[in-house]
Image (tube, rainbow, N blue to C red):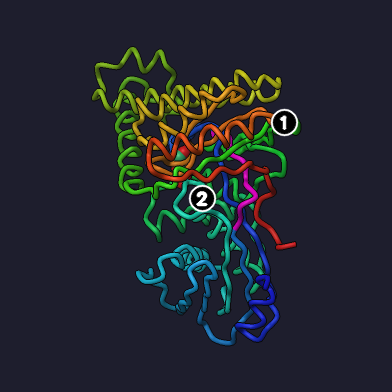
């Protein structure tokens, strides 16, 4: 039964909104977005789907096919839910939209998804964007895609409490089929970068380690970056974010920073450089160089930014050792979740058969391997 049929069965009404919003993989540019830097994500074939039909009262009733659970809240008093924490993204989006004066109406809605949860592929951003689109559909108003991303980000920051950057919501909203997006997270200007269509596959491998520490460590990394900015600002008053600092400025002032803060800043600064370079190598079709940049990115995230974990390191190293693999790195916030690898199409089989059993041997865990298709951003369900 598809989601529209399920909607009719459960609510006895035809959905007026039926939407989809994708998860994402970030190719390079990790932990740069809250430093006003550059990122290069692509939207994935994994998506969250939602249907909704209006109600005559101010209640929002949600049913999650994934969790086989219902929850209801009133638009006049939106509080987070403990039992149905998956609904907090939809609640948060409603809360922000109302703060901004959008006219929300009560609705019955169904959610289903294929984005693996808590795996660093942005199932939350996908759910936020899908929620936004159904509120628009039921409330009969329209928001542009960049504003959608900003509102969804606010829901995550102000309602859910994760001080995330803009990358995940932006790519879920504005992704383009067969393209990655170079996003300047300061100006929000973006440029679609065509992904190679033949001969190369983007492979996502899930460590299947549920991300544990991620929220608190994430907020700590942000604070460390702010500490670096505050110290460097004393020397260079024009510095507003690590985006404005280059390697020479950092090295010259190393003694002013705590060692750990210096290393965090070094990651962000070198990662920004790598991301800008990566787009150029993508345009030039130099996949070998793109792969090297991915490998360097992983080392920097592991050693300087310290957001990797043993399972991610093992999975990355196994991938890097397969012949025909150009590069491999962790993707997303870290502490578990997924790796992304650039693989010659004829090496995908070798990747599967070499990496999966060795990962099992080393960790006792199974990896799930998927070949990515870069997809369009959030919109109506076909
Ligand atoms: C999470 C956040 C993003 C970004 C990444 C790390 O996915 O939501 O904004 O900071 O981590 O690159």
Please state the horizontal and vertical placement of residue 358, each as a whole percent of the image: 46, 34
Mark 2: few/some/many CA within 10 Å (<14, 14-19, 20+): many
Q: Which mark is residue 196?
A: 1
Label 1 and label 2: CA atoms lie apart by 23 Å
Q: Please give the name of the residue rendered at 25% of the width and 23% of the height, measured from the top-left corner.
A: 259
Query: Considering the numbered disc 2 on the image, is that residue within a helix, a strand or a loop?
Result: loop
Quadrant that contains the C terminus: bottom right
| First of labels 1, 2 by sequence position | 2
Regarding residue 240, the answer to whether it shows in the image is: no
Regarding residue 59, the answer to whether it shows in the image is: yes
Q: What stretch of residues is rendered in magenta?
A: 39-47
Quadrant that contains the N terminus: bottom right
Question: Viewer-proximal residue, 313 or 351?
Answer: 351
Question: Does the Cβ of the disc 2 residue fall within 8 Å of ligand 1?
Answer: yes
Question: Viewer-proximal residue, 107 or 109?
Answer: 109
Please state the horizontal and vertical placement of residue 281, each as a whole percent of the image: 64, 21
Query: Considering the numbered disc 1 on the image, is that residue within a helix, a strand or a loop?
Result: loop
Question: Which residue matches tag 2?
Answer: 122
Disc count in the image?
Answer: 2
Location of residue 340 (image quadrant): top right
Please state the horizontal and vertical placement of residue 289, each as a whole percent of the image: 60, 18
Q: Please give the name of the residue rendered at 59% of the width and 69% of the height, measured from the top-left corner.
A: 135
Taking the image as shown, residue 324 lies to the left or right of residue 80, namely right
- Judge whether 56 appears above or below 369 on screen: below
- Judge whether 69 appears above or below 293 on screen: below
Taking the image as shown, residue 201 lies to the left or right of residue 238, namely right
Q: Please give the name of the residue rendered at 51% of the width and 50% of the height, measured from the top-left corner.
A: 122
Is residue 45 a member of the stretch shown in magenta? yes
Please state the horizontal and vertical placement of residue 371, each as a whole percent of the image: 63, 41
């Amino acid at each position: 039964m598809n989601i529209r049929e399920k909607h009719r069965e459960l609510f006895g009404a035809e959905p007026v909104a039926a939407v989809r919003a994708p998860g994402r993989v970030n190719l390079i540019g990790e932990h740069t977005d809250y430093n006003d830097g550059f990122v290069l994500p692509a939207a994935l074939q994994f998506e969250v789907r939602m249907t909704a039909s209006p109600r005559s009262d101010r209640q929002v009733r949600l049913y999650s096919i994934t969790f086989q659970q219902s929850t209801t809240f009133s638009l006049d008093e939106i509080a987070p839910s403990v039992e149905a924490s998956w609904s907090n993204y939809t609640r948060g989006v409603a809360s922000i939209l109302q703060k901004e004066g959008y006219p929300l109406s009560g609705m019955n809605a169904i959610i289903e998804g294929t984005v693996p949860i808590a795996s660093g592929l942005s199932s939350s951003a996908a759910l936020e964007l899908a929620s936004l689109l159904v509120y628009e559909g039921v409330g009969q108003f329209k928001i542009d895609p960049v504003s959608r991303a900003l509102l969804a980000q606010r829901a995550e920051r102000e309602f859910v409490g994760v001080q995330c950057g803009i990358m995940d919501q932006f790519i879920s909203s504005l992704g383009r089929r067969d393209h990655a997006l170079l996003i300047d997270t300061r100006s929000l200007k973006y440029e679609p970068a065509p992904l190679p269509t033949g001969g190369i596959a983007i492979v996502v491998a899930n460590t299947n380690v549920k991300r544990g520490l991620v929220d608190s460590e994430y907020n700590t990394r942000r604070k460390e970056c702010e500490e670096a900015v505050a110290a460097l600002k004393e020397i260079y008053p024009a510095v507003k974010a690590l985006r404005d600092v280059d390697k020479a400025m950092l090295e010259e002032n190393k003694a002013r920073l705590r060692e750990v803060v210096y290393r965090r800043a070094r990651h962000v600064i070198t990662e920004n450089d790598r991301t800008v370079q990566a787009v150029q190598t993508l345009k030039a079709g130099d996949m070998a160089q793109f792969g090297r940049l991915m490998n360097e990115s992983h080392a920097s995230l592991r050693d300087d930014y310290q957001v990797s974990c043993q399972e991610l390191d093992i999975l990355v190293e196994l991938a890097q050792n397969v012949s025909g693999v150009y590069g491999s790195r962790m993707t997303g916030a870290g502490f578990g979740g997924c790796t992304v690898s650039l693989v010659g199409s004829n090496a995908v089989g070798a990747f599967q058969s070499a990496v999966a059993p060795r990962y099992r041997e080393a960790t006792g865990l199974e990896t799930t391997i998927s070949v990515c298709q870069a997809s369009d951003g959030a919109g109506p369900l076909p």
